Image: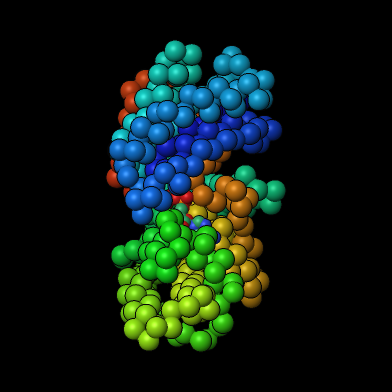
Amino acid sequence: MKILGIESSCDETGIGLYDSEQGLIDHTLYSQVAMHAEYGGVVPELASRDHQKRIMGLIEHLFEKNQLSWSQIDGIAYTAGPGLAGALMVGAGVAAGLAAAQSKTLIPVHHLEGHLLSPLLAEEKPDFPFLALLVSGGHTQLMAVKSIGDYTLLGETLDDAAGEAFDKCAQMLGLGYPGGAALSALAEKGEAGRVSLPRSMLKSHTLDFSFSGLKTAVLQTVKRFEQENALDESAKAAIARAFQDVAVEVLVRKSRQALQQTGLKQMVIAGGVGANKALRAAMQTMAAKEGTRVFFPPLALCTDNGAMIALAGAYRMHDRGSHHYGATIYPRWALEEVSRQHSSAVA
Ligand code: KG4
Ligand code: ZN
């Protein structure tokens, strides 16, 4: 069974082709990052227009490159939410139109379910059940994943998402938008312990996260260095290092607590921040001590992409796929709502 996947929830137009027997066939991506960087964040209307401009060309390119024709495709999966309404509408409209024209099954996919299942695209794959840490630009959640569609939210951020915190701190250090990867690269050059930031959120015993205090502390530190005329490259690197150390420590400690509470022996880390090297290393160390195996998506598939949507579509073909060609979107959509017991409420 071959599925075409279309991702357009934010600022990347991603197209993927997944075969349930062979695995990922191919994927392609156009990132709008450079366009939005000028404005310091994603401009929704520009995002929608750019998706419109690129999407059909990317699909045609992927078909040609892999010498595929429509007759070989069984279903078309698209990100139905959560995300920017206009951007989602472009992917949904194209997917619904193509599915109607080619008589294919149309499969609305939850963006976070795509991220959650993306470690299944790696060479080493987890088995169900597993603990998932979803760390993206919009979400930070710990989920117990029993099987496809059986997700229990264990904890989430009470304010900023992890990626958002990385991006905001990067902006304070003049690293542009989105600055998560740049901040991480700078942190690698920073002296550990030169700057200290509060670890107050580590005192909470719940599985919820909070990054706003850390963000404020970074802002105060940047201002202090500025006042002292000392915000040079090495100071910036030390601040980036201190921020990353605390952010990673929080994510690792809460994950360890969730593993201990649930007794799960496997864990996956997905979403853009899952590309962070320090986080990957610290999670590996923690997991080894806990006797847990940890899985990541391939590096290129941590951030938004069409491959994970095609994969989730293949798993959801039978319970969510249909021949009703409405371009349905859910700009605000909790992942728990796609759990099996709730699926009729949103389908
Ligand atoms: O999953 P994603 O592509 O988009 C959302 O669904 O939000 O995640 C994007 C987020 C951005 O905040 C970006 O700065 C962050 O992931 N990110 C990183 C790294 N690479 C991307 N954060 C920290 N370290 C990285 N290496
Ligand atoms: Zn995402």
Which of these two is toward me, 96 or 120? 96
Q: Position of residue 113 (x, y in %)?
A: 46, 45
Which of these two is toward me, 296 or 218? 218
Which of these two is toward me, 61 or 157? 61
**What residue appears at the point 61 percent right and 52 percent down from the top-left corner?**
299
**What residue appears at the point 53 percent right and 66 percent down from the top-left corner?**
184
Q: Position of residue 187 (x, y in %)?
A: 54, 72
Task: Tell how many labels.
Answer: 0
Q: Quick check: 5 left or right of 127? A: left
Q: Is residue 82 in view from this perspective?
A: no
Residue 139 versus residue 99 in the image, above or below: below
Residue 88 versus residue 122 in the image, above or below: above
**What residue appears at the point 57 percent right and 66 percent down from the top-left corner?**
185
Q: Position of residue 49 (x, y in %)?
A: 36, 32
Residue 135 versus residue 228 in the image, above or below: above
Question: Quadrant where the C terminus lies?
Answer: top left
**What residue appears at the point 55 percent right and 83 percent down from the top-left corner?**
192
The image quadrant of residue 101 is top left
Question: Quadrant where the N terminus lies?
Answer: top right
Residue 49 versus residue 148 in the image, above or below: above
Q: Position of residue 126 (x, y in %)?
A: 62, 53
Q: Is residue 43 in view from this perspective?
A: yes
